Image (cartoon, rainbow, N blue to C red):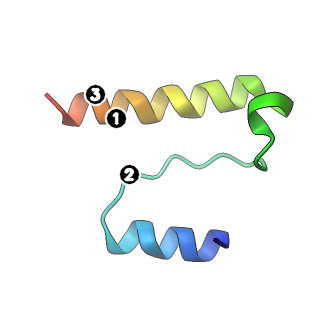
Amino acid sequence: MLPHKQHALAGATAAHVVSLDADHMAVMNAPDKFATALRIAVDHVAFIGK
């Protein structure tokens, strides 16, 4: 799915978005950026689940 469609879907569902300026290989090519974004996303889900 193209990024603009991802953002439209996120907006339509009021989803929390954590942006990462990287491609699908970020986990290998930018592990620090990926880990930070993942931590932010997990913290958000953990917080709203309480």
- Residue 19: image location, x then y, percent: 59, 49
Query: Residue 2 falls in which quadrant of the image?
Result: bottom right
Q: Are marks 1 and 2 in contact (CB under 8 Å)?
A: yes
Considering only vertical position in the picture, is 13 above or below 25? below
Residue flagged by tag 2: what amino acid is it? His
Q: In which quadrant of the rendered view does residue 32 lie?
A: top right
Q: Are marks 1 and 3 in contact (CB under 8 Å)?
A: yes
Q: In the image, 4: left or right of 45?
A: right
- Frontmost residue, 31 versus 1: 1
Q: Residue at x 54, y 68 (%)?
A: 6
Identify the image quadrant of residue 43.
top left
Q: Is residue 43 left or right of residue 50?
A: right
Rounded to the nearest angstrom, the CA distance separating label 1 from label 3 is: 5 Å
Q: From mark 1 to mark 2, how far is it between C-alphas?
A: 8 Å
Q: Find residue 16 and name its label.
A: 2
In this view, the residue farthest toward the right is: 29
Q: At x 46% / y 52%, what residue is drawn?
A: 17
Q: Residues within 10 Å of mark 2 (few under 14, many from 20)?
A: few
| Quadrant occupied by the N terminus | bottom right
In the image, what residue occupies the spot 30% across and 64% down? 14
- Comes first in the chain, label 1 or label 2: 2
Q: Please, what is the three-letter code of the amino acid marked with disc 1?
A: His
- The circle on residue 20 is none
Helix, strand or loop status at disc 3 = helix
Q: Can you identify the residue that label 3 sits on?
A: 46
Tag 2's secondary structure?
Answer: loop
Where is mark 1, residue-wise?
44
The amino acid on which the numbered mark 3 sits, given as a three-letter code, is: Ala
Question: Which quadrant would the C terminus be assigned to in this image?
Answer: top left
Q: CA distance from mark 2 to mark 3?
A: 12 Å
